[in-house]
Amino acid sequence: MPRAGLEPAASRSSVSHSPKLSYRGALCARGMTPLNVFTARKVDRPTVRAGAGPAVDPCRRRRDAYESREGRFHGGDSSRPRIISSTWLYTERKDGARTGAPPVPDSAVTTLLRRPLLGQSEDAVASTVGTIMALLVFLTFLSLITNQYVPVWMKDAEATHMSDALGQFGEFKSSLDLQILAAHTSLLADEPYVPVTTFTSVKVGVDGVPIFATPTIGNLRMDQEGSRWSVNFTYNLGGNTTLVPESECGCGGSVRLRVFNRFYLAQSIAYENGAIIRSQDDGQVVKGQPAFRVGIIENTSASVDFRLIELFEVGSGDVTGVGAEGLQARLIGLDLQEYTSIQTAIEIRAETLHGPAWYRFFNETLARAYGITTEYYGDFPAESDLIADYAPDGRAVQLTANNPVYLVHSLWDAASGTYDLIVSFKLDDLGDSIDVLPVSAFRILHAYVNVEVGAL
């Protein structure tokens, strides 16, 4: 039942909340009754004692203390207005009037200083630190891939590519050898030969690693003037001294693959005059041997078989890139000549980029055929020379193996940028005690081949 003098119990209490509010008590406006919102009791204003100075308003004292404490978070300016929501405890009657809620003056709003949202600030700092750490881990992993894994991967890829290219050049050589063999067989059988065209695929460069490493570029070139060979000697033909026609032909040509390796050694692979040669800055070697044979006949004479392969360029003859390109070869002619009654020393000459490789090949082949060892040069020091002269960069400037039986000589010509190669079969000098077997027969197989590069 309602008490006397009061409205029926239709009034209700309500609390207006504002989230994230740090509240220590209701601050009072001038002329208002201070109220403790937690006890709903009035706060008595202190009386002024004589000589004690002016009375201090508890609301003012609380607000001053709060502003002085919190002002450091707002630039130290506690007088700057801060408009926030607060929590007031009041009673609302049926007619809508509110009891206990402090009035808000029309000319001002209640000014409170808000405490900084420490929890949110700590969360933001933790999120930033976590992001930075994740980026550092990612960059470390990326650096490991770029500086360690990619170079090893590319070096292995480039080395594998050079081995594969060597095998592809071997297929090219084999296809030409088979064509020459078929044509030679038809020639000996006096049967017509039907030319065929062989095709060989050669991978020019090395694919890179996406994003981390660019591809390695290669160049495949057919150079008709790249390697020039000739054979010079005279023989007796019907009582006449005759010079062999190969003395002035300048036959040859080369197919060369240069790969500009960045992680592995920069190398090149070449096919010239029936041989496959692999070369790099510090040396070169014949990997696929040409058709060259020296036979000893009953220890009284020697016979020599030599092949000249003349390459003719078809098309552009030059391609640069990374992918696979084609090599097409077609034998268009074959000529076999056997020379006897040789009157002079036989001399094979060449201008080539691979003088040291050819020097080693000819010297080893002739030494095995004639039984020449290192001790032989010591037994005949006046008639023999072994010279190996290298430049500071490792280039073989001069290589010479000279003995009473043969001469193999390779000399670098800086003006032309090629090696001058000489292979000579010497005649027996009747004035000394050294017996030299004469060459009773010299056979030359001269092949003519059309080569097209980039026909894939």
Image: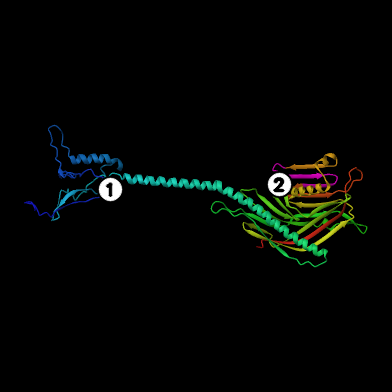
Q: Which residue is at the far front? A: 298
> Dot 1 corresponds to which residue?
20
Q: Which amino acid type is shown beneath numbered disc 1?
A: Lys
Instruction: Name the residue: 52% across, 46% down.
Output: 143
- Give the colour scheme of this rendering: rainbow
Residue 51 x %, y %:
13, 32
Magenta span: 391-410
Q: Which residue is at the far top? A: 51
**Residue 332 on the magenta span:** no
Does 233 appear above or below 185? above
Q: Left or right: where does residue 264 sit relative to residue 355?
A: left
Distance from disc 2 to disc 1, alpha carbons, whole Å, reads 80 Å
Residue 129 x %, y %:
41, 45
Q: Quick one: quadrant of the C terminus?
A: bottom right
Whichever of labels 2 and 1 marks the residue nearer the N terminus, that label is 1
Q: Left or right: where does residue 447 sit relative to residue 114?
A: right
The majority secondary structure of the magenta stretch comes to strand
Q: Is residue 103 visible?
A: no
Give yes or no for contact between labels 2 and 1 (Cβ–Cβ under 8 Å): no
> Dot 2 corresponds to which residue?
283
Q: Is residue 66 visible?
A: yes
Say which of 206 and 9 sits in front.
9
Q: Which amino acid type is shown beneath numbered disc 2?
A: Gly
Residue 144 x %, y %:
53, 46
Residue 49 falls in image quadrant? top left
Determine whether the residue tagged by mark 2 lies in a helix, strand or loop. strand
Residue 198 x %, y %:
71, 63
Q: Which residue is at the far left? A: 4
Q: Left or right: where does residue 89 sit relative to residue 7?
A: right
Determine whether the residue tagged by mark 1 lies in a helix, strand or loop. loop
